[in-house]
Amino acid sequence: MTGELRERMKNFLDGNFKLIEKDFKKLSPEKRIELYERYLKYCLPTLASTEVSLNIEKLSDAELDQMLNRLINKEDGSIEETK
């Protein structure tokens, strides 16, 4: 999506907000959600997925111990400060 199209959509929504809001309230809940989702994609940036890969065999014993301790502390609700 180009920046120009995003700007046009934003201007359209801003300029017709009261009318859109009035019409929006007349829609069924399902249609409201559908319309809301459609408009959001023009206003919010799209999030990209992130992939994390971990090769445990390459970690030292100290690094493995540190990771396990962090996981255990998170499970019991403790908050550990990351350095």
Image: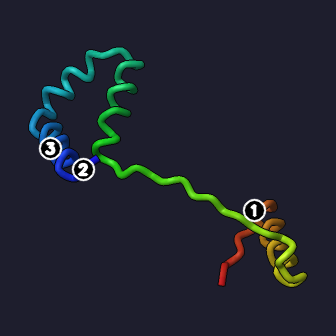
Q: Distance between the residues labelled 2 and 3?
A: 10 Å
Q: Residue at x 18, y 44 (%)?
A: 10
Q: What element carries label 2?
A: loop
Label 1 sits on residue: 77
The residues bearing labels 2 and 1 have C-alpha atoms spaced at a distance of: 44 Å
Q: How crowded is mark 2: few (under 14 residues within 10 Å), some or many (20 or more)?
A: few
Numbered disc 3: secondary structure: helix
Residue 33 % position (x, y): 39, 26
Q: Nearer the viewer, residue 71 or 1?
A: 1
Q: Nearer the viewer, residue 74 or 5?
A: 5
Determine contact: label 2, label 3, CB under 8 Å.
Answer: no
**Closer to viewer: mark 2 or mark 3:** 2
- For the C terminus, the image quarter is bottom right
Q: Answer with mark 2 or mark 3, whichever residue precedes in sequence.
A: 2
Which label was assigned to residue 2? 2
Q: Earlier in the sequence, mark 2 or mark 1?
A: 2
Disc 2 marks a residue whose amino acid type is Thr
Give the x, y percent position of residue 27: 30, 16
Which amino acid type is marked by label 3? Arg
Is 36 placed above or below 51 here?
Answer: above
Q: How far apart are marks 3 and 1 (CA)?
A: 46 Å
